[in-house]
Amino acid sequence: MFVALAPVDLRGSFNRLAALTQNILAQDPLSGHWFVFINRRHNRLKILLWDGSGLWVCAKRLEQGRFTWPRGEGACARLRGEELIALLTGLEVREKSGWDRR
């Protein structure tokens, strides 16, 4: 799954998110990957995904607080499924410096 690192305008739906996927993330929206976008205030996100027969758009709006968003170089970052679940439930998905995963 790919996460757009920079906030985007989320007022659009299928066509807008598909265009963002192609133009900003340089990915094919019909690839079967999930594409995750955040708004400027970090309190709304949308996920675009292709299930083989059509596009899905899933949205979440926080009533309080903000999503912790990954940082990195370039336009997007890749997340594993468990990292997306952590992000959606409000946990931090950034790597900690000095933290050893061995």
Image (cartoon, rainbow, N blue to C red):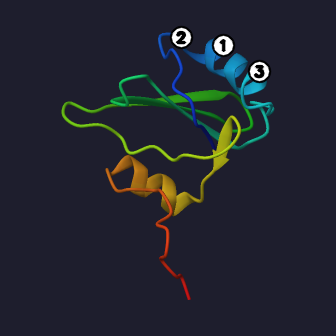
Residue 34: x %, y % from top left: 63, 41
The secondary element bearing badge 1 is classed as helix
The secondary element bearing badge 2 is classed as loop
Q: In which image quadrant can residue 44 be found?
A: top left
Q: Earlier in the sequence, mark 3 or mark 1?
A: 1
Contact flag, marks 1 and 2 (Cβ < 8 Å) = yes
Q: Residue at x 71, y 27 (%)?
A: 21
Q: Earlier in the sequence, mark 2 or mark 3?
A: 2
For disc 2, the marked residue is 12
Q: Amino acid at mark 2?
A: Gly
Mark carried by residue 15: 1
Q: Residue at x 51, y 14 (%)?
A: 9
For disc 3, the marked residue is 23
Q: Amino acid at mark 3?
A: Asn
Q: Is residue 1 visible?
A: no
Residue 46: x %, y % from top left: 49, 29
Q: Amino acid at mark 1?
A: Asn
Position of residue 37 in the picture relative to residue 78 (left or right): left
Residue 6: x %, y % from top left: 56, 30
Q: Nearer the viewer, residue 32 or 101?
A: 101
The secondary element bearing badge 3 is classed as helix
Position of residue 48 in the picture relative to residue 85 (left or right): right
